[in-house]
Amino acid sequence: MEKKNLDWGHLDFDYRETDWRYVAMYRNGSWGAGELVEDPNIVMNECAGVLQYAQTVFEGLKAYTTQDGRIVMFRPDLNADRMMDSCKRLEIPILPKELFIEGVEKVVKANEAYVPPYGSGATLYIRPYVFGINPVIGVKPADEYMFRVFTTPVGPYFKGGVKPITIKVSDFDRAAPHGTGNIKAGLNYAMSLHAIVTAHEEGFEENMYLDAASRTYVEETGGANFLFVDKEGDIVIPKSDSILPSITRRSLVTVAKDILGLKVTERKVAFEEVGSFKECGLCGTAAVISPVACVNDHGKEIFFEDCREEMGPVVKRLYDTLTGIQMGQIEGPEGWLHEVK
Ligand SMILES: *Cc1c(COP(=O)(O)O)cnc(C)c1O
């Protein structure tokens, strides 16, 4: 398989059209068989449910080349499960797990020429999503849905070294109690755009969202979960029903406990105690874990001592171990690497 001639080490996180996408339709009460198609455009009615009432959920994962030359995806079964949960909450007919796995496998295989070579740091980002496509004007769930998967090659997240970021405590809320914060729905992102644009204008890279009810507990950022390291070197993970269950964060917890022998506690984390932590990382597919140097609370700077200049030692061990497992250099738990053949 001849690879496309791309500058793998310098790709941005931008949409770049690849050759194939996978499409399956839900009609007349059931999911039909999926197929690979070449057209990157979707034609739909002006009144499509997704356009009027934002009935859409998505996933994000990546395919890449391991040290021994295999093309793999990282734990796609968990993305499938999470998409089923997301569908349920938005009254979208649940996408069968097998259809999800077939879709991501086929689209990666078909776009093999875009899977970056080992060592480039780049990956083929995979975007599966499901949305209501038939006309809906009275407020109700759509009757017809499209499941679609496209891919786009993206560059290494940390180009030119890892620099810990500065984030701000947001004045906006991300997710209401009993709301949709725990599912991966486009609507959660639509309403976070103003907050992230505001943060960027003020010179911050991300927002720290607190719980919407009391504004006293730490939740997550717009698209990544928090992981903290306390004075004892133990790991603390914020717990809340409105946090999106990051697959990267759950995998890092397993790595910490079972491979590195670290102590991990998942509990509510009061914003007040954030200053007592030594390290802070943001967990998500794109960066795996990126260090946070400082949280700015309305002008008051709270520093994570061991992450001020570079990734703190515990965050670094977690990062090295999980990326080592992903690249096939370190033996990980059974089933974490899903080979695309
Ligand atoms: C996707 C997402 C994450 C990260 O999840 P991963 O499965 O690790 O990629 C975290 N928070 C939010 C709000 C997300 O949408």
Image: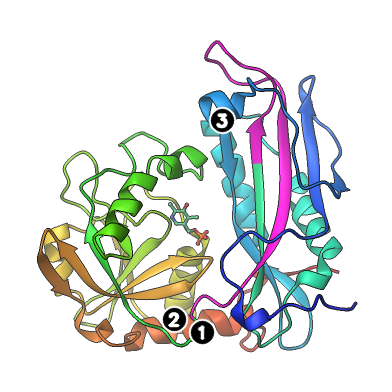
Residue 174 position, x and y percent, is: 33, 44
The local crowd at label 1, few if under 14, some if 14 to 19, many if 20 or more residues have their Cα within 10 Å, is many
Residue shown at 65%/73% (left/top)?
Answer: 123
Q: Earlier in the sequence, mark 3 or mark 2?
A: 3
Disc nearest the viewer among 3 and 2: 3
Query: Mark 1: which amino acid?
Result: Thr
Q: Specify whether 99 is left or right of 33.
A: left
Name the outermost residue toward the front. 201
Q: Residue at label 3?
A: 55
Query: Mark 3: which amino acid?
Result: Gln
On screen, residue 254 above or below 325: above
Name the outermost residue toward the right. 1
On screen, residue 65 above or below 53: below
Residue shown at 57%/13% (left/top)?
Answer: 137
Residue shown at 77%/70% (left/top)?
Answer: 114
Residue 237 falls in which quadrant of the image? bottom left
The local crowd at label 3, few if under 14, some if 14 to 19, many if 20 or more residues have their Cα within 10 Å, is many
Residue shown at 33%/79% (left/top)?
Answer: 164
Q: Specify whether 238 is left or right of 2.
A: left
Distance between the alpha carbons at the discs numbered 1 and 3: 38 Å
Residue 278 falls in which quadrant of the image? bottom left
Specify the label residue 318 is tagged with.
Answer: 2
Query: Mark 2: which amino acid?
Result: Leu
Asked whether disc 3 touches disc 2, contact meaning CB atoms under 8 Å apart, the reply is no
Q: Residue at label 1?
A: 321
Q: Earlier in the sequence, mark 1 or mark 3?
A: 3
Asked whether disc 1 touches disc 2, contact meaning CB atoms under 8 Å apart, the reply is yes
Q: Is residue 240 on the magenta stretch?
A: no
Classify mark 2 as within 8 Å of ligand 1 or not, answering yes or no: no
The residue stretch that appears in magenta: 130-158
Residue 273 position, x and y percent, is: 14, 65
Disc nearest the viewer among 1 and 3: 3
